Amino acid sequence: MAALKAGNAAAAAELFRSAIKLDPTAGSLWRNLAHASRLMDDHAGERAALEGALELDARDFPALVRLAQWHERAEDTREAMIRWTAVIQLGEQIADPAPALLELLDHARAYCAAQNDATITPVRSKLGPRIAALEQTPRRRAAAFVDHVLGQRRVYQNVCAGLYYPFLPPDEFFDDHHFPWFAQLASQTDAIRGELQALLAEPGDDLIPYVRMERGVSGGQWGQLNHNLDWGACFLWEYGRPNTPVLDRCPVTAAALAALPSAHIPGRAPSAFFSMLKPRTRIPPHTGVTNTRAIVHLPLIVPPGCGFRVGGETREWVEGRPFAFDDTIEHEAWNDSDEMRAVLIFDVWNPHLSAEEQATVADYCETIDALTSPAAKTATLSAA
């Protein structure tokens, strides 16, 4: 240290090497050797010393910072990003960071962001044509992969409030080829829209708020929509129960739904309804109850300024073009226009479930519902 203070970096480096031979597990000696090497413009020696310190302790924060700086000076972008990322991960765990550390972390983030941004255009130019030539499923997955590794897309997982079926792919939007009946459904858009418009002209008691929370239940994010027709619904089916008055008034829609491969589970499925979102209304991010189903939207009335996000993908509704998604992945909707937006919404089986698995889910639901019904409980108490 005295040699360093005197400006004799070469002597200091030699002494540090001798000390390391005597005490090779002292990280401070390796860091000091790196400092002396840098003063000597011995870039290879500086890097070797810093790596020696990190071999002893991969969480040696000062050594990690200085190695990140070394790679940045050497314009070794890949290694610099790896080291700066590690600095960020460790630095964010430090309680009450000093201003100098905050400044260092800001630099690390800015460097990584700048380098990542610099890769976006060449990566997309290289991979774009290849991805565009893929079929729907690999194209969607490859595009999501590139977005994710470039830091431009978050990957969402299933969050089920109820029934979770393991190992199903956590698709945000299901690919159209799973639903060969989409074309037939789309061909009936005009007739279904006409039935909705006639229904809304004289809705009576058939138009109700979609969000109807019981008394005493905190509204939370649903407070503004609770018992509010800003998000209204006309149910054709609700939890496996037909709403005969609405079905009778909408025979084309009723027939279209009857032709679909819907799940029929008493008290649970299917559900189908016209969903009306008033102007300047947003449905907050939320998740559904089970990944055993797919939710289908058939857009009927869509003014400009409406949108729908599932996980990391945002789509615009296009009138007459149905799509399906997994509602156990966070999703939200909005109508920023000055007109009403209307969509026919219904559920079908998750297309990744086999017929045997569908039967297993249905049998489970019917069995558990029978065992927990009031009648079953009464019979159990009587037998006791």
Image (cartoon, grey):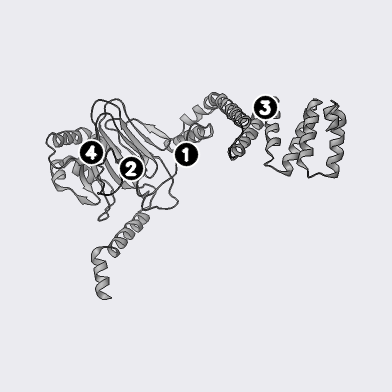
Residue 172 occupies quadrant = top left
Q: Which amino acid, mark 4?
A: Asn
First in sequence, mark 2 or 1: give its number: 1
What whole-number distance in Å separates the C-alpha atoms at marks 2 and 1? 25 Å
Q: Which of marks 3 and 2 is in front?
A: 2
The percent position of residue 230, horizontal first and vertical second, equals 24, 35
First in sequence, mark 4 or 3: give its number: 3
Marking on residue 155 = 1
Q: What element carries label 4?
A: loop
- Residue at x-position 36% and y-position 32%: 315
The percent position of residue 203, horizontal first and vertical second, equals 14, 38
The percent position of residue 247, horizontal first and vertical second, equals 16, 44
First in sequence, mark 3 or 2: give its number: 3
What whole-number distance in Å separates the C-alpha atoms at marks 1 and 4? 32 Å
First in sequence, mark 3 or 1: give its number: 3
- Residue at x-position 68% and y-position 29%: 69
Q: In this view, does 9 lie above or below 218?
A: above
- Mark 2 burial class by Cα count in 10 Å: few <14, some 14-19, many 20+: few
Q: Quickly name the residue at label 4.
A: 228
Q: What element carries label 2?
A: helix
Q: Quickly name the residue at label 3.
A: 72
Q: Which amino acid, mark 1?
A: Val
What whole-number distance in Å separates the C-alpha atoms at marks 3 and 1? 29 Å
- Mark 4 burial class by Cα count in 10 Å: few <14, some 14-19, many 20+: some
